[in-house]
Amino acid sequence: MQPGPRSSAKLALAISQPSAAAIERAPAIQVQNLSIVFDTNRGQIIAVDRVSFDVSHGEFVCLVGPSGCGKSTVLNTIAGLEVPFEGGILVDGAPVHRPRPDVGMVFQQPHLFPWKSVRRNIAHGPRVSGKSAREANAIADDLIAMIGLKRFADAYPNTLSGGMQQRVAIARALANQPRVLLMDEPFGALDAQTRAVMQDNLLELRERINATIVFVTHDIDEAIVLADRVLIMSAGPGRILRHLKVNLPRPRSSAIMLEPAYLSLKKDCLDLIRAEGLRAFQQSDES
Amino acid sequence: MTLAMHDAPSTREPIASPARLRSGNGGFYRLNIAIGALSVPLFLVVWELISRSGIVNIVLFPPPSVVAVAVLEWIRSGQFFWDLLASLYRVTCGFVIGATLGVFLGILTGEFALASSFLSPLFHILRPIPPIAFVPIVILWFGLSETGKLFLVVWGVFFTVWLSTHIGVQKVDRGLIRAAMMLGTPRRRMLQEIILLGALPYIVVGLRTAVSIAFYALVAAELAGTFVGIVYRIEIAQQNMQTGQAMGGLAALGLISFLADRLFATLAERIVWWR
């Protein structure tokens, strides 16, 4: 079942350039002195401690760190889902307080609406933002073709594999043509093989869309393969240890993991993480 | 709750699926069907034998043949039709009103903490009061009118549906809500689509339980003074010492609520269409 007028519904992802010149000058995302404190029954826990970084337009940034370092919390804050925080979060120069449709999010779980078919899941965003069913379906069908799930357009999520569901979740986030795409360990729940395929898919997809991407993972390989820049975080409290520029050529695929340049980058990362891990271990031993 | 939910499709599965899975085992499957078909006739034969054996008083414990004659007479006189109609009317109207209120208030208390703080304590205190305990006061309030009968059925249905909706709304996957928020879903749409459909599997379980409860409440309702209805007929038969008629009434009540439950189970699978 194909929609009628394809031409009118051509995905405008590639031309979703910022309208105002002022917006263009500001970085896509600015995180300024972000601190987040959680109240627990054992007292206050500093989850994120004065974290600052910028992400420029179209950049692909990976946040890497051990479990519990607050990387997902940082991402949720940029999404507008984490309410109380100190410091500033600006997306396109405007402070973030609540979710906004030009910031898309892909979670670790696909969280697809089980009562909607693949097409209608993807069309949900355009629909609630006021597009007609026809327009929304055309956007969905373009994205379905892009993620290679044409045969499953009318299938319900519970009939899809985990990898397929996550592809639909990515397409659903892209349907709103977000200027910023946030991804919270989106491949974390997948097996190693599916994960590698998904990484290649994302790299391909990224060549076709123009969104700024912030991707959270605890997998260093995944971070280096995907990112333009890797931010390495430490745990307890969450801080940014280092920014690491990934100057590997694009377009990439996961095959790049065999290149010497890749391996030396990975070695830098591992050394840093090992030193930090050792420090944290000694610290916890002393206290 | 989830267990009860999965119960819906599984009740018909054991008859159909094992045969498909184990086609080599068709003999066992046929035996199973044969034994299943024997269940009710065998029960009737044993009942007939015991009633006629002289161990029990045949007037108080009539055999199925006598019950069947009484039921046929009931149907032939035309009374059965009106009794059935009156009872079904009370159950259906009471169910629809009670269920609508239950779903509406369940979403309200499930979603809004203030509404829940205000209403939940009250509902939890009122909920355990069985409809039959209301019969005396309902007669005082509504006399012998149909309103009183509806009140009792609504009372029984409402709390069950309210509670399952309330729980269902609170159990809606937070991840779905976050995903919907990130896609820019407005508040109204969130309630009408994400929350309502997310809670639907629970609501359906509550509705199905409420079908049986509606029939319990019907008994109370028709004891609260009426002139037509299946339970009313049982009561009259008891006063006239027509035990065959009384038992026929019980059988009819059992059969109708069984059919209603089956019908609802079939319907439930269509309501939760994505499963």
Image (cartoon, rainbow, N blue to C red):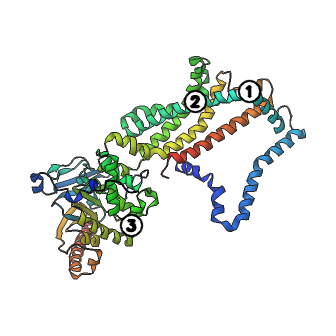
Q: Amino acid at mark 3?
A: Leu
Q: Residues within 10 Å of mark 3 (few under 14, many from 20)?
A: some
Distance CA(mark 2)–CA(mark 1) = 26 Å
Query: Looking at the picture, how far across and down is residue B23, in whole percent?
Result: 67, 66
Dot 2 or dot 1: first in sequence order is 1
Q: Amino acid at mark 1?
A: Gly
Q: Which mark is residue B78?
A: 1
Query: Is A28 placed above or below B251 here?
Result: below
| Residue linked to disc 3 | A190
The type of residue carrying mark 2 is Val
Which residue occupies the foreground of this view, A33 or B94?
Answer: B94
User: Picture quarter containing residue B145?
Assistant: top right
| Observer-nearest of A28 and A67 | A28
Q: Quadrant of the C terminus of chain A?
A: bottom left
Q: Secondary structure at mark 1?
A: loop
Name the residue that disc number 2 marks. B153
